[in-house]
Structure formats: C-alpha cells, structure tokens
Amino acid sequence: MPQVTLGIDPGVSETGWAVLHEDRLKASGLIKTTPVQELPQRLCHIHREISRLLETHRPDALAIEEMFFLKAAHTIRATLQARGVVLLAAAQAGCPISEHNPRAVKSALTGNGSADKAQMQRVVSKALGLSDLLRPDDVADAAAIALCAWRCGRVKRLKVLEMHGGRS
C-alpha cells in the first residue's frame, strides 16, 4: 500500500517540510516567520501552513524530529512551541504522528549517528533519487525525517507480514 509521509523539522523562524510518496520526494519547502511578528502570530502562521499541507497532501503519517538541544533556553522554548502547533495540526487532522531522534535518523540513513549535515544531505539526495542536494538544511532535515519514518514503517510492515505468513 502506498505510503505518503510528511516530514517536519520544526522551528519558529523556519520550519522545513517534505512530502514523500514512499521513498520519492513529491514536494518540499520552508515555512518562514519574521522576528518582527509576535510569537503568537508566528505560531498561528506555522499552524495554518501545516494544516494546509495536511489538507493538500493528505499524508498517511506525519514524522517530526524529537527535540534535542544544546542551545540557549529561549531557542528551546520557541522551538518546542513551534513543535507543539505542528503536533496540534496533525492531531486535528487525525494524522498519525511518529517522532524521531536526530541521532537515530542519522544512524538509520548513514549508519553513523554522528553524521554531519553534508553527509546527511548527500545520503538523502541519493536515497530520494535527486540530482542536487536539498536546500536549505531545514528542508533536507525534514526529508531525512520522513525517509527514516517511511523506512522504519516499512520494516514494521514487513515484520507483521512475516508473522502472518505473508498475509496482511
């Protein structure tokens, strides 16, 4: 059964997104907000755009990055709030959500949980059959999260089929 996955790399200033149909990129982009807007307006914009993506692409699942921070507290707080409105939009749309740790995504795609951005971009572009690297980083990260989710889901589906003697 075809699987459409919406991958999200949340952020207040820039939220990367990528839509995969199985292991092929169908659409991607960046939701941008400006620092001159108040935080509630920025969050509202992110929520509205994610809701629009969910309505347009009708994904079978939304994959989002788990939060892992070594940054300043104000960055953590704002990013967690952006992540919250993404989760809210998915819940409102009835879209299943999977969360993926950045190290696990790197490990699943490259075999190295400490892979750098350049290596990840090359692997993601090659895995998706793209001739160029995905840019900016937030979009490439969203595609990596979606690809990881699809691959993990595929493994789970194969295990279920195996347990049932090849019957679904």
Image (cartoon, rainbow, N blue to C red):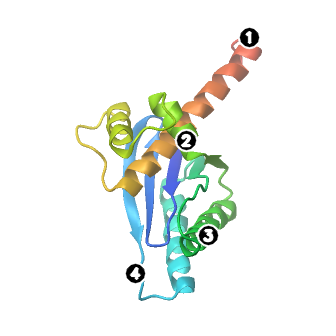
SS for callout 3: helix
Residue drawn at point x = 32 percent, y = 56 percent:
136
Tell me the CA gap for discs 4 and 3: 17 Å
Badge 4: residue crowd in 10 Å (few <14, some 14–19, many ≥20): few
Say above or below: 143 vs 78.
Answer: above
In this rendering, the label closer to the viewer, 2 or 4 = 2
Say above or below: 46 vs 8.
Answer: below
The N terminus - image quarter:
top right
Q: Which mark is on residue 34?
A: 4
Badge 2: residue crowd in 10 Å (few <14, some 14–19, many ≥20): some
Tell me the CA gap for discs 2 and 1: 33 Å
Q: Which mark is on residue 134?
A: none
Observer able to see residue 3: no
Q: Are marks 3 and 1 in contact (CB under 8 Å)?
A: no
Residue 91 in the image: state x and y as whole percent.
Answer: 69, 61
N-term mark: 2 or 4? 4
Question: Quadrant location of residue 125?
Answer: top left
In this rendering, the label closer to the viewer, 4 or 3 = 4
- Give the amino acid type for the residue marked by disc 3 in the picture: Val
Tell me the CA gap for discs 3 and 1: 41 Å
Residue where numbered disc 3 is placed: 85
- Give the amino acid type for the residue marked by disc 4 in the picture: Thr
Tell me the CA gap for discs 2 and 4: 29 Å
In this rendering, the label closer to the viewer, 2 or 1 = 2
In this rendering, the label closer to the viewer, 3 or 1 = 3
Residue 48 in the image: state x and y as whole percent.
Answer: 53, 73
N-term mark: 4 or 3? 4
N-term mark: 2 or 1? 2
Badge 1: residue crowd in 10 Å (few <14, some 14–19, many ≥20): few
Residue where numbered disc 2 is placed: 103
- Give the amino acid type for the residue marked by disc 1 in the picture: Gly
- Give the amino acid type for the residue marked by disc 2 in the picture: Arg
